[in-house]
Image (cartoon, helix red, strand yellow):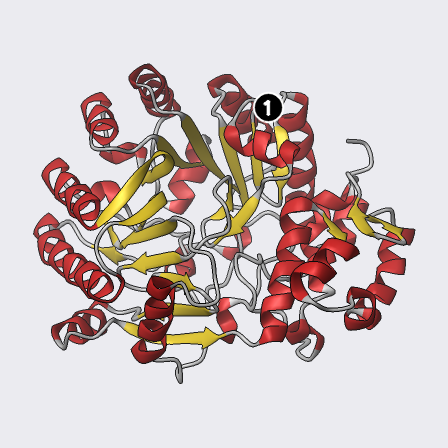
Amino acid sequence: MSFLTPELLSRFDVPGPRYTSYPTADRFVEAFSQGDLRLALAFRKQGVGQKNGPLSIYVHIPFCESLCYYCACNKIITKHHEKAAPYLHYLKREVELYTEVMGMGQSVSQLHLGGGTPTFLSDIELGELMAMLKSSFSLTPGGEYSVEVDPRTVNHERLAFLFEIGFNRLSFGVQDFDSEVQKAVHRIQPAAQVFALVAAARKIGFESINIDLIYGLPKQTPESFDRTLSQVNELRPDRIALYAYAHLPGRFKPQRRILTAELPPAASKIDMLSRSMEALMNAGYVYVGMDHFALPDDALAVAKRQGRLHRNFQGYSTQPDCDLIGLGVSAIGRMGGTYSQNAKTMAEYVDMLDQASLPVVKGLVLSRDDMIRRAWIMSIMCQGQIQFDSFNEAWLIDSKKYFAPELGQLLSLQAQGLVDLFESGFQVTPMGWFFVRGVAMGFDKYLQSDRNRTRFSKII
């Protein structure tokens, strides 16, 4: 870990895409309509141009009882839980529009409830939602069925109910255990509460438990975050997601409540990242990539070792690259050679569904070049390598000619120890994995013609 110095991290402290898709969501256009999505759904049903594997489903639950000041998610702050029932009605209507085109019983191997706060819903409502999804789709045995959990909204009984209705993975939003940091971001949750819930989840039988952490929050210092990491190591979750806080108050109104003077300086933030990576890997966690860490026997770490890692809008996954249905306000989906995004406001989402229209407001039909570059970039992001012969065979191109300018630029990354170049392809080095977004960015056609990258988070 000594090679991950603050100086090296500073060199790559630049904005860049997260590549949960390619092209990235900022390239979606309003010219994409529900007609384009319906056509892609019909192609899937007919098996046109693709081999259909199981689907992935993402359901966005936008409601939260209280506002976390750092949050950049699409959410609705309310204590009126009765607002959930009408929303569930519209989620059901959206699913019906999908199944009208695709047919009932499509196989699903991955389901994720995100938000907002999915556990804003009552047990009865969560049960109804899962029952509706199970009656419309076929959830395969051994799939990944996960839900994001605000520790302040659940107890042992609620966790047991989540397991009973079919969830086998949990993700707890922790961010930081330091009480002063929690006050500064308006999210108070004692460490003892989280420890009790994780212990309960393990006893109940959840296959994998994730903890979300954020560095760069107000009042954080490298020393205070060291203490949080020490507690996390004691907690020993199966997975850890370590995110950098991006302070963009011009784009995200809640962040205006954060005092800029209380944010750690850039040098301290980079120090936190360096110390966090060292602490987690010294504690036995495998660095999966970007902001993901996992214990060696967790399915995500195993997939990384075996070269079976994949990436979608929820981040790294063990599930094969597959079509994704995004349900709910602002949800993003992928179907064949298209991406689509739902309306971001509840009013527009509801209005479109009342008109029996899929609530799509923008998206993209990928060109052949987009699809070639998507496969190339995802191979870098997930397997950390490119083998020219196999890629040429899959896409009927000459990789060396197709990517000649970009491959030439890899020489500087090789000089920095981030990639190894061979006649047969190239490989991201162990050090290069920490900067894999930077490697992938060199093959992004849109970034090559657009140097304004401030829309993205920092690549580390």
Q: Is 71 positioned to the left or the right of 345 in the image?
A: right
Most distant residue in the bottom direction = 31
Q: Which residue is mark 1?
A: 296
| Residue 332 seen in the current view | yes
Q: Nearer the viewer, residue 291 or 252?
A: 291
Q: Residue at x 90, y 54 (%)?
A: 423
| Residue 216 seen in the current view | no
Place of residue 297 in the rendered image (x, y in percent of width and height, measured from the top left): 55, 22
Q: Is 376 positioned to the left or the right of 142 in the image?
A: right
Quarter-wise, where is residue 40 in the image?
bottom left
Q: Quadrant of the N terminus?
A: top right
Quarter-wise, where is residue 205 in the image?
top left
Q: Residue at x 31, y 73 (%)?
A: 38
Per the image, label 1 sits on a secondary structure element best described as: loop
Location of residue 418 with respect to 398 vertically, above or below: above
Place of residue 84 in the rendered image (x, y in percent of width and height, measured from the top left): 13, 52
Location of residue 81 with respect to 409 vertically, above or below: above
Place of residue 457 in the rendered image (x, y in percent of width and height, measured from the top left): 58, 59
- Circle 1: is it few (<14), some (14-19), or many (20+) Cα within 10 Å? some
Q: Is 37 positioned to the left or the right of 282 in the image?
A: left
Q: Residue at x 29, y 54 (%)?
A: 60
Location of residue 419 with respect to 283 vertically, above or below: below
Q: Nearer the viewer, residue 370 or 72?
A: 370
Place of residue 243 in the rendered image (x, y in percent of width and height, measured from the top left): 54, 45
Q: Is 303 positioned to the left or the right of 160 in the image?
A: right
Residue type at the position of mark 1: Pro
